[in-house]
Amino acid sequence: MGLLIGNQTKRESDNKLVITIFATLSLTRKCKQKDRVEFDENQISQALEKAEQIKDRQANVIGWY
């Protein structure tokens, strides 16, 4: 499991939202049940810090996998 790091922009030509994913961060699942996805809060905090450290891009957590 992990987080998708990227950004979103609006395309001027047709005003559609474009999401670009340029990094992933792997995390360890807190809960091992197949119907649940839980991450440790410390891991999420560290992932957000890593996203902020990506230079030359406006980076956000876009989603998870």
Image (cartoon, rainbow, N blue to C red):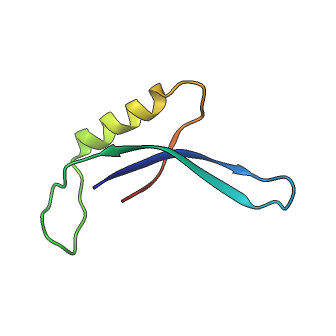
Provide residue 30's location: percent of width, then percent of height.
16, 55
Residue for point 12% across, 64% down? 32
Relative to 14, 6 lies left or right: left
Q: Position of residue 52 (x, y in %)?
A: 47, 30
Residue 10 left/right relative to 55: right
Image quarter in which the C terminus is found: bottom left
Q: Quadrant of residue 50?
A: top left
Task: Write the residue at 31% across / 43% down.
Answer: 44
Residue pushed farthest left?
32
Residue 18 screen position, x and y as percent? 67, 55
Image x and y of residue 48, in percent: 40, 37
Position of residue 34 relative to residue 12, above or below, is below
Q: Residue furthest right?
A: 13
Q: Residue at x 22, y 69 (%)?
A: 36
Point out the image quarter for the N terminus.
bottom left
Work out whether 64 lies above or below 6: below
Residue sitting nearer the eye, 28 or 44: 28
Q: Is residue 17 above or below residue 52?
A: below
Q: How many marks?
A: 0
Extreme-bottom residue of the structure: 35
